[in-house]
Image: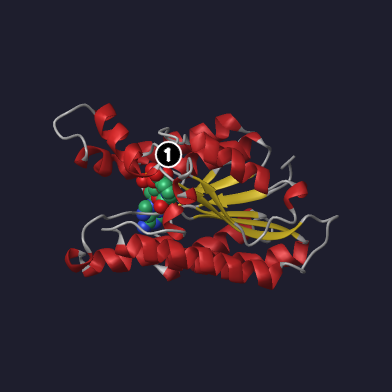
Amino acid sequence: FLHGRTALVTGSTSGIGLAIAQALAAAGARVAINGLGSHEQISAAIKAVDTAGNGGTQHFSADLRDPTDIAAMMTALADWSDGGVDILVNNAGIQHAVPLAHMPVEKWNDILAINLSAAFHTMRLALPAMAARGYGRVINIASVHGLVASRDKAPYVASKFGLVGLSKVAALEYAAESDRARGGITVNCICPGWVETPLIEPQIEARRGGGSRDDGIRALLAEKQPSLRMTLPEEIAALAVFLCRREAHNITGAALPVDGGWTAQ
Ligand code: NAD
């Protein structure tokens, strides 16, 4: 159902972003990927997304810490997508878990820049073209940490609460810019609990306590996620694809937890 649509997924050389890029391609979209990595990792990501869909995947190499780089990427994307992408997934994110007083200032700056400010820049540059076409989907990958806090994650929690707020403002501004027939402009956050990706490896490692990696995973889940099951990246991707459907035109300004009950507590 996404034939003829284009999408940008930031941070899609790995983890959740790569799974979303593959799922959007499988639904028919032409997908632009972005993210850091070796030449091999980027080539493998392009191939994985091409294989999932109909080809035409392109990598845009912007470093999301740099607003000038983001603006250049969005200009190049406007050419690639004939005026601007229909679907924007702000997924890139980094984490650093240490107590607030020990948080390096450069980690604060990088986390806020990548997890929050980059989404502001891509949205301010992508939303006007979506409004002009009458269809647009912004899907921001926030976190349970956009809804509740945990210790040792000051910049991460601040960035994700900020992303939830930013998304609600954009949802309001664009809510009436379209109609049911054209599909609407919606802006939402997906708020995952623990998802098995490279991002959480250091936190698994920190809880192994001399045991196996599985022991580390069990300890991590027991702390916060009542289902005691990890979410898989493709499960987050399935929700992202649903949000792109026409039937989802009235889901906007939402922050949707996929967290095994974490935020129900
Ligand atoms: P990941 O580490 O597997 O992937 C992160 C992606 O972001 C990579 O493609 C990386 O290259 C990219 N990236 C990092 N810095 C960048 C930069 N400066 N410029 C461009 N790209 C950059 O992580 P993931 O777990 O797939 O995380 C994806 C998103 O999901 C993040 O926003 C994260 O906060 C969020 N999230 C993850 C979990 C989880 O448990 N894994 C839970 C909740 C939310």
Q: Where residue 198 sits in the image (x, y, percent)? A: 33, 40
**Kind of residue at disc 1:** Pro
Figure quadrant of residue 14: top left
Residue 216 shown left or right of residue 17 in the figure? left
Residue 40 shown left or right of residue 170 in the figure? left
Q: Residue at x 29, y 67 (%)?
A: 108
Choose between 224 and 185: the one closer to the eye: 224
Residue at the limit of the structure toward the left, as seen here: 210
Q: Residue at x 36, y 41 (%)?
A: 39
Choose between 63 and 264: the one closer to the eye: 264
Residue 160 visible, this angle: yes
Choose between 70 and 195: the one closer to the eye: 195
Residue at the limit of the structure toward the front, as seen here: 265
Q: Where residue 212 sits in the image (x, y, percent)? A: 21, 26
Q: Where residue 201 sits in the image (x, y, percent)? A: 28, 40
Q: Where does label 1 land, which residue?
A: 226
Q: Residue at x 65, y 66 (%)?
A: 171
Residue 92 visible, this angle: no
